Amino acid sequence: MTATSVAIRAVKRDGTPRRPKRAWGNPWTYLLATILVAICIGPVLYIIIGGFRSNAQITEDPSGFPSPWVLTNYAEVLASSEFWVAMGNSTISAVGTTAGAVVLGVMASYVIARYDFIGKGAMYSLFAAGLMFPVTVAITPLYLLVRNLGLVNNLAGIILPQIAFALPTTIIILVPFLRAIPKELEEAASIDGTGRLGFFWRMVVPLSLPGVVTVGILAFVTTWNAYMLPLFILNDSHLFTLPLGVQSFASQYSVDTARVLAYTSLSMVPALIFFSLFEKRIVGGLQGAVKG
């Protein structure tokens, strides 16, 4: 086949270029991906749709669709003060943890990435080792520490430990971003009279913004869904976060399954919306961290 014939086939009769045929790949891959997506999304959809059903409908057909659709379950949950108190506590906890993890993580990552000092590798390895210790392993000594600090039944008692547990992930992601910043920029900034702090705030933070957004989103979503630490630290119902609120609500209205499903759905919505809006930011930030 000559180059002329290829060029003729690449153009339609009206003169517009033809779109190249897309290679769809292996169909088994798409089938497997569809099954995995259905497994992940199925329970979420069941909970959300279940909130629009009555208890009689759930008892008669647990896997059916609402017939008719019932809106009173969501309306009653939204009208209850318990839900909004738990929502406010979760917001304070998530925002406080995210702010602390991002600020401290950027500062620590900047030092590890840009300066040479004794113990640099050991410090980085220590933060990396923190990824292997979940909250459940350290919950007993952590509770004793929080109790000795007088932070039991206090939102600060869950915010500070959550910042500590979020720092390893934050530093592991941000160090490659900060390490990839050319040293020539720092030298040029120093020639212009910019100090180290000025270079940090004016150059480092803006250039590492994709990584900062990524770690901020991960810290927010993780904190929003945290259950184990608030369960041990918070005993006052007025300080319950949404995961504890779901448990308390389910115990209080154990017979009213439809309303429990509505409460659970509303507690998931903020995190789902937040994660969906910034999904591309997370993927882009993680790709940048791998490349760095």
Image: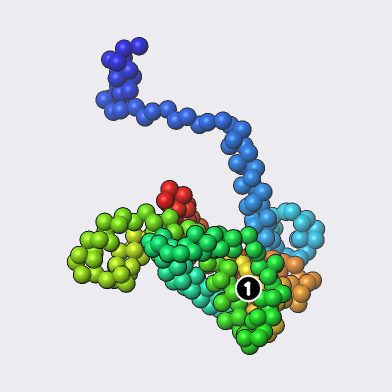
Query: Which residue is most to the left?
Result: 192
- Circle 1 residues within 10 Å: few <14, some 14–19, many ≥20: many
Residue lying at 30% horizontally and 23% vertically, measured from the top left: 11
Residue 252 percent coordinates (x, y):
76, 77
Residue 181 percent coordinates (x, y):
34, 56
Residue 140 percent coordinates (x, y):
72, 74
Q: Is residue 239 visible?
A: no
Residue lying at 63% horizontally and 60% vertically, measured from the top left: 132
Query: Which residue is most to the top?
Result: 1
Colouring used for the render: rainbow
Q: Quadrant of the N terminus?
A: top left
SS label for mark 1? helix
Q: Is residue 105 visible?
A: yes
Residue 19 percent coordinates (x, y):
37, 29
Residue lying at 34% horizontally and 27% vertically, measured from the top left: 18
**Above or below for 2 versus 287:** above
Q: Nearer the viewer, residue 107 or 68?
A: 107
Q: Amino acid at mark 1?
A: Leu
Name the residue beneath numbered marker 1.
242
Q: How many marks?
A: 1
Q: Find residue 188 and report its image quarter.
A: bottom left
Query: Which residue is most to the front?
Result: 118
Q: Is residue 154 left or right of residue 249?
A: left
Q: Find residue 7 and report its image quarter.
A: top left
Residue lying at 50% horizontally and 31% vertically, measured from the top left: 24
